Image (tube, grey):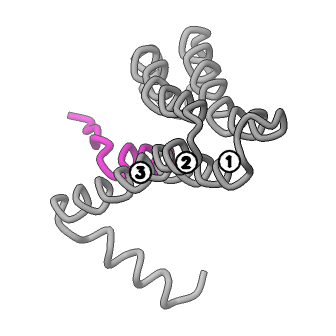
């Protein structure tokens, strides 16, 4: 990793959490805007189904995530937590695959597909960055 990029990332991570939340909310709003514009500009509201997958994709991890072992070195794997990860991955893949299938079938235009997929990248990326930056640090006390 280049030195300048590492310095920039380190500087961004040291900002106050308020600035991080504002930046993440702008990215999330841009993602939803792209998804809604992919529907509105081309007069076809089928890509709006992808927005529903955005909303429900993190839910299985949130619900089934409590069954994960607290010890990262443990070889114990919970089938319930694995099922939650599986459901999350199905929803994320459907969020990216649905616009491609709709475009291939001729239901939406290719530009609407690109806008919907780029909106999905922004929304899912925001969710991942949020969960990474604001993960609670567990103490051993």
Please give the residue where the numbered disc 3 appears in the rendered image. 33
Q: Residue furthest front?
A: 43
Sort mark 1 into few (<14), some (14-19) or many (20+) by Cα contacts within 10 Å.
many
Q: Which residues are magenta?
A: 124-141
Indicate whether residue 13 is drawn in magenta: no
For this orientation, the residue located farthest to the right is: 104
Q: Is residue 127 magenta?
A: yes
For image coordinates 48% across by 90% down, the residue present is 4
Q: In the rendered structure, are the residues bearing label 1 and label 2 in contact, judged by CB atoms less than 8 Å apart?
A: yes
Q: Residues within 10 Å of mark 2 (few under 14, many from 20)?
A: many
Residue 2 marker = none
The mark nearer the N terminus, 3 or 2, is 3
Left or right: where 89 falls relative to 55: right
User: x%, y% of residue 47?
Assistant: 59, 35
- Secondary structure, mark 3, is helix
User: Dot 2 corresponds to which residue?
Assistant: 38
Relative image position of residue 118 (x, y in whole percent): 58, 54
Q: Residues within 10 Å of mark 3 (few under 14, many from 20)?
A: some
Foreground tag (3 vs 2): 2
Snapshot quadrant of residue 27? bottom left
**Which residue occupies 41% across, 75% down?**
9
Reading the image, the residue beneath label 1 is: 113
Q: Position of residue 3 (x, y in %)?
A: 52, 89
Disc 3 to disc 2, how far (Cα)?
8 Å
Q: Residue 123 in the image: x percent, y percent?
A: 46, 46
Nearer the observer, 49 or 141: 49
Q: CA distance from mark 1 to mark 2?
A: 7 Å
Which residue occupies the extreme bottom position in the image? 4
Name the secondary structure under disc 2.
helix
The quadrant of the image that shows the C terminus is top left
Mark earlier in primary sequence (1, 3): 3
């Amino acid at each position: 990793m280049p030195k300048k990029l590492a310095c920039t990332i380190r500087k961004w991570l040291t900002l106050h959490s308020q600035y991080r939340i504002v930046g993440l909310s702008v990215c999330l709003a841009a993602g939803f805007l792209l998804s809604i514009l992919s529907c509105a500009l081309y007069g076809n509201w089928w890509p709006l189904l992808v927005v529903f997958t955005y909303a429900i994709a993190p839910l299985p991890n949130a619900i089934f995530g409590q069954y994960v072992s607290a010890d990262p070195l443990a070889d114990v794997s919970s089938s319930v937590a694995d099922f939650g990860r599986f459901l999350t991955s199905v929803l994320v893949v459907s969020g990216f695959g649905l616009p491609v299938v709709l475009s291939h079938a001729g239901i939406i235009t290719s530009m609407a597909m690109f806008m919907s997929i780029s909106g999905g990248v922004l929304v899912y990326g925001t969710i991942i960055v949020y969960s990474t930056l604001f993960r609670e640090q567990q103490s051993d006390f």
